[in-house]
Image: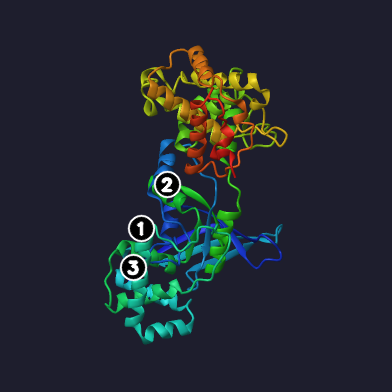
Amino acid sequence: MTKNMLKFEYIAQRFKQRDTSNQEILLLTAPAAEIRRWAGVPRKTFDYQHGFQRTLSPSRVGEISSYFQEDKKNISPTSIVLGFTDKDNRVKLENIPLANNPASTITRVTIEIPDLDSEPIESLIALGINALRQRLPASTIKQIDDNSEQAVATALKLQDEESVDEEFGITDEKPEDNGSTLETPNRSYLGDFYAELIGLSKNLSSISEPDKLRQIIYSLIKPAVIVDGQHRVFGAANADESIQLAVCALLQSDWTENVYQFVVINQKAKPIKPAFLNSIIATSLTQSEIEQLYSRLQTSSIDVGKAQVMNRVNTDAESPFRGMIDFEVEGSEGFLQFPGIHKLTKDFQNIPRSHPVLASIGTWSTTTDTWLPHFYALWSGVKDYFASNDPRLWEEPSESNPNNLLKIVSLQEIQRLMLDNWADSRAFTFTTPQATKEQAKRFWSEFPTTFFTDEWKKKGLQTTVGRDILRNAIIETRRNIGRKSWGHRRLGLFQD
């Protein structure tokens, strides 16, 4: 082992969050590049199933790096969550008690570790074996050590089988499994990895990806692991190694605690939904403020344009969907789901690519929203026809109002059918909003409104098969308009 040692010092606040807990927490700040040196990331890979972190996404790291590089004012105040797993006295704490707050202490944190990046892979393998021997049951260690050749062969065989299964999309999950239950593994992945390291140390197998192996071993032998925030750490370090990140670290946190915290953070926390996020942007910023912040918000992967469009569709006086969109915030009175209506508008915006015969890119600007009046016009034509025959068809569906027209799947399939029909017939192109409205209204001429008020007995219409059933039912009904002794109720959509 090299004698080249690295030393890091920080000032932290040390406390217990609850009197009833034995778990101590450190709050500190540290440069992103330094965190990478002394904290490992236990990522799950084909050949190392014991990790609990997701695979590092290069694109996500790139986004975060760009975010920090785009504007020197950009910061990330959210804490990185770490677990100190140190059992080798490499993390030393020197307390400075606070007289006015006995539950909290100012602490000097000193971390001293070897420069692992300069260590040969053989030394790291030996350190990894030693670390695993401290965690695995003695019986498992003995079983592997006593018959290492067979143990190594078995571990490698299982690894290869899982890699092939994953590559071809083969899983052991049952179709009805929703991930809500936990099963006890039928083998120890950690034991398998120990056997693999033993095999490497005895030259029973060869190293195929040394860089990847290094990262895996780092997560075992470094004094801390990143529980949450790996992409922020790597992205910030790539942008500027001196960027200071807030750190919330659990002291003497074993792997069980770290995995538990990872699950809690990722499963129990309620993320901001896209609808809510877009509502915040659209309703909290003026146009001039949005323009000032637009580039920064784009770097943060927040779609301001989407927020503005959806807000207009919900508030413009000429919009047939005015007041109907559910932004998923308290007080929102809409009932049409935000994601579904956003897809409806997005598909319409995309007409020059999906149906170029109807509109050219040059006349269909998404930056000046020349497409939006046509979107309003098309749906105003649909609304005029159906609501004039049965006003309930443009009102919120309920038990007393069995309205199948204002369902997301219906709206999406209706729009797709109209655009496909117009493109195939070459009988119409988008010229003026008034012409669009008249053409849309004419498309549904004599179509029975009871098609959308009669009970639809087919379920699962959001699936590909279900959408085809709905679309074909509409086509068949239009084709048979005026035909005697024929009715839409004989179609599969209305049958059990």
Q: Is residue 442 above or below residue 484?
A: above
* Tally of numbered tags: 3
The reply to whether residue 376 is in sight is yes
Q: In which image quadrant can residue 357 be found?
A: top left
Dot 1 falls on a residue whose secondary structure is: loop
Q: Which residue is mark 3?
A: 160
| Separation of residues labelled 3 and 2 (CA atoms) | 28 Å
Circle 1 residues within 10 Å: few <14, some 14–19, many ≥20: few
Q: Is residue 187 left or right of residue 460?
A: left
**What is the basis of the colouring in this image?**
rainbow
| Separation of residues labelled 3 and 1 (CA atoms) | 13 Å
| Separation of residues labelled 1 and 2 (CA atoms) | 25 Å
Q: Position of residue 15 (x, y in %)?
A: 64, 61
Which residue lies at the image location 26% right of the left edge and 71% below the top edge?
206
The answer to the question of whether label 3 and label 2 lie on touching residues, with beta carbons closer than 8 A, is no
Q: Is residue 241 above or below residue 332?
A: below
Q: Which residue is mark 2?
A: 60
In the image shown, does 238 or 267 lie closer to the viewer?
A: 267
Q: Earlier in the sequence, mark 3 or mark 2?
A: 2
Q: Which residue is mark 1?
A: 168
Which residue lies at the image location 48% right of the left edge and 30% below the top edge?
475
